[in-house]
Image: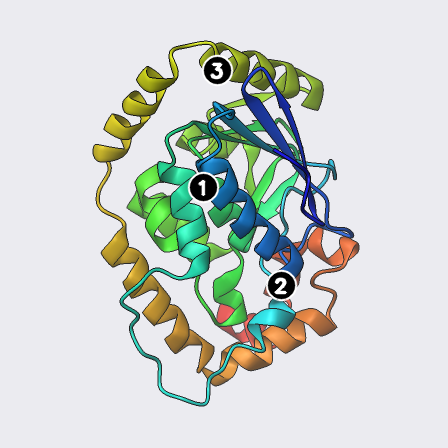
């Protein structure tokens, strides 16, 4: 696979494709990164030379911060929301990661949140680092909801009650808790230890008969509840949240308070709690 992306570099060795995300300053899922991810997932899904996909970040502190709030603010809200009959490009991208006929692995060395976490949740396996990996689903304080599959993926991965805590609480989830809840397969004491383990695992899987790996993954996917209708309904509900007056105001406030800057994203849970009206809501 050739490197044709502005924000993703790839390296293929022995059937293992390592894709490295680089979109400074904090890997916000800007339109450029989003479009690269959509194109990348479509290409890798049909690449016969790729047996295992490993996603990682060039930034040790951020995998993908979240979807670009400035872009969300441009989504049209002048017409009433309508329920789509086809999956959005974002949902389609995540579903490809979940269902393509080759394993997908996310290495979460640092923070991951919002749409970035929804992308990671769509991978078959996730690994993290003790004291470094932090998960945050921060949409509800902004007045919206996780519209990239989060409301569908998280209950399946960690259970309804814990998904409610992650989505509605919008607080940081540390690596130890995420592993205990089953969101992370394993956590390691260092990034290097995670890298070594995932490299060995990916190469091990890539050495097995390709057809057996593909069919085994398909059978596991078949054990999961159907996603399509839930994703379509999630997209419809997300459109409704965009039309709430609090959503437009809170997203603009978050940007003004430092969201999408390196310092703001490092304390995103606290920043969400400082949004106008949050103090009254917590009192």
Circle nearer the N terminus (3, 1): 1
Mark carried by residue 121: 1
Q: Which residue is mark 3?
A: 206
Q: CA distance from mark 1 to mark 2?
A: 18 Å
Circle nearer the N terminus (1, 2): 2
Q: Is residue 63 above or below residue 114?
A: above
Mark carried by residue 200: none
Front in this rendered view, residue 250 or 116: 116
Could you say where residue 262 lies in the image, as x and y percent from the top left? Answer: 77, 53
Left or right: residue 124 compared with residue 135: left
Tell us which disc is closer to us: 2 or 3.
3
Could you say where residue 153 lies in the image, as x and y percent from the top left? Answer: 36, 46
Q: Secondary structure at mark 3?
A: helix
Q: Secondary structure at mark 2?
A: loop
Could you say where residue 114 lies in the image, as x and y percent from the top left? Answer: 53, 54
Front in this rendered view, residue 61 or 266: 61
Q: Residue at x 60, y 63 (%)?
A: 272
Mark carried by residue 68: 2
Q: Categorize mark 1 by other alpha carbons within 10 Å: few (<14), some (14-19), many (20+).
A: many
Q: Residue at x 41, y 28 (%)?
A: 102
Front in this rendered view, residue 268 or 115: 115
Q: Categorize mark 2 by other alpha carbons within 10 Å: few (<14), some (14-19), many (20+).
A: some
Q: Residue at x 62, y 35 (%)?
A: 133
Question: Does the rendering let one see residue 136?
Answer: no
Q: Is residue 51 above or below residue 151?
A: above
């Amino acid at each position: 696979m050739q490197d044709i992306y502005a924000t993703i570099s790839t390296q293929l060795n022995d059937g293992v494709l390592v894709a490295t995300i680089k979109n400074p300053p904090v890997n916000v899922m800007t339109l450029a990164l989003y479009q690269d991810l959509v194109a990348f997932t479509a290409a890798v899904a049909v690449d016969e030379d790729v047996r295992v996909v490993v996603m990682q970040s060039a930034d040790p502190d951020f995998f993908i911060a979240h979807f670009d709030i400035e872009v969300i603010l441009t989504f049209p809200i002048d017409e009433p929301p309508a329920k789509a009959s086809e999956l959005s490009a974002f949902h389609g991208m995540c579903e490809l990661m979940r269902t393509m006929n080759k394993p997908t692995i996310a290495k979460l060395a640092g923070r991951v949140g919002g749409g970035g976490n929804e992308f990671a949740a769509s991978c078959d396996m996730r690994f993290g680092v003790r004291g470094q990996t932090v998960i945050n689903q921060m949409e509800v304080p902004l007045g919206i909801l996780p519209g990239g599959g989060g409301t569908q993926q998280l209950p399946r991965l960690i259970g309804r009650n814990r998904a409610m805590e992650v989505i509605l609480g919008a607080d940081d989830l540390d690596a130890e808790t995420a592993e205990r809840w089953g969101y992370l397969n394993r956590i390691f004491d260092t990034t290097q230890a995670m890298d070594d383990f995932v490299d060995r695992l990916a190469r091990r899987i890539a050495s097995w008969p390709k057809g057996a790996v593909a069919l085994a993954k398909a059978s596991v996917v078949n054990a999961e509840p159907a996603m399509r209708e839930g994703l379509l309904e999630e997209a419809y509900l997300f459109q409704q949240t965009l039309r709430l007056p609090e959503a437009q105001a809170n997203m603009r406030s978050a940007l003004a308070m430092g969201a999408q800057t390196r310092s703001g994203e490092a304390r995103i849970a606290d920043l969400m709690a400082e949004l106008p009206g949050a103090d009254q809501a917590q009192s």
